[in-house]
Amino acid sequence: MKGFCTHYKKKIKEAVYIVIAVLVIALFLFPLIWSLPYSLKDGREVFKMSEVGGSISWFPEKPCWDNFQEVFKVDVNGGRFLNALLSTFVVASCNCFFSILINMLAAYGFARFNFKFKNVIFTYLLFFMFVPGIAIQLTSIKVVSELNMINTIFVLFVPGMANSYSIFFFRQYFLNIPDSVEEAAMLDGASRLKILISIFVPLSVTPMIIIGVGAFLGSWNSYIWPTLVITENEGTLTQVSQILYMLKSVNSHDYGVVIASCIIAMIPPLILFFIFQKKLVEGIAISGLK
């Protein structure tokens, strides 16, 4: 009888967890599910629901596929949506690559080398994990201005390449790799660089994907920083978040086009998630165990 009650309670808990999970998923998916049909509505039908006595219909009366074509035709201050997509993809890819490279090298140094004031420097580095980026925004602009990086593509990804959390994440992962593996490689005559490339990099695919995807999405969704540091060359260096905001102002009479542009802008991050979803889940498990 006691075993039956325990089994019964376990089933109830599982059912409660499933219900909660479904509700959370529905909460996050609702905006996307609601916006998909609205991307196929023309301006008249979108504003129809705001009229007195207007009806709210989820399905479009007549699908307007031209909205997705119109997105690529709109010219906003010399910038086009396709150019913004390509520019943002290049910036995000550079940020992803260099974030992995620089933070991994720094983490390897903290994990495997002994040098003077190492712990002091690392503690100082960790301090910046708790400083909001917006708090040092003006200082950062002053620095990149002195370096003549304003209105260049480099200002969009160079300042954010080194990251305290990324260095900490890589370092904690490297510390769990046995010293005996590295010592055996050194006895065989391998250099530090070869050990890093041949041993640490293959063993660190999961944290590399976690940091890389995070850096890519950070650049893809960035709005405030590009707006502050790009005051010229808007046509070539306009980022996706910027052009989405400008489209909302220019196409305020046709929200179908605006919503269609948002749907298109979501495609690269979604593709990234589906490609690396297994590694992302593994990364969450790793961060919870370290």
Image (tube, helix red, strand yellow):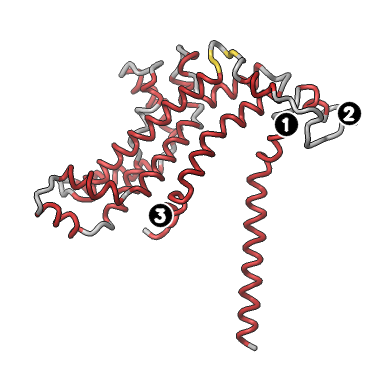
Among all residues in the image, which is located at the extreme right? 53
The residue shown at (19%, 57%) is: 181
Where does label 1 land, which residue?
Answer: 38
Numbered tag placed on residue 227 in the rendering: none
The kind of residue on which mark 1 rests is: Tyr
- Left or right: 166, with 28 as reference point: left
The quarter of the rendered structure image containing the C terminus is bottom left
The kind of residue on which mark 3 rests is: Ser
Spatial CA span between label 2 and label 1 = 20 Å
Where does label 3 land, which residue?
Answer: 287
Pick whichever, 138 or 197, lies toward us: 197
Q: How many marks?
A: 3
Q: Residue 149, located in which quarter of the rendered image?
A: top left
Q: Nearer the viewer, mark 2 or mark 1?
A: 1
Q: Nearer the viewer, mark 1 or mark 3?
A: 1
Numbered tag placed on residue 52 in the rendering: 2
The kind of residue on which mark 2 rests is: Val
Q: Position of residue 65 (x, y in %)?
A: 70, 25
Depicted 105 relative to depicted 283: above or below: above
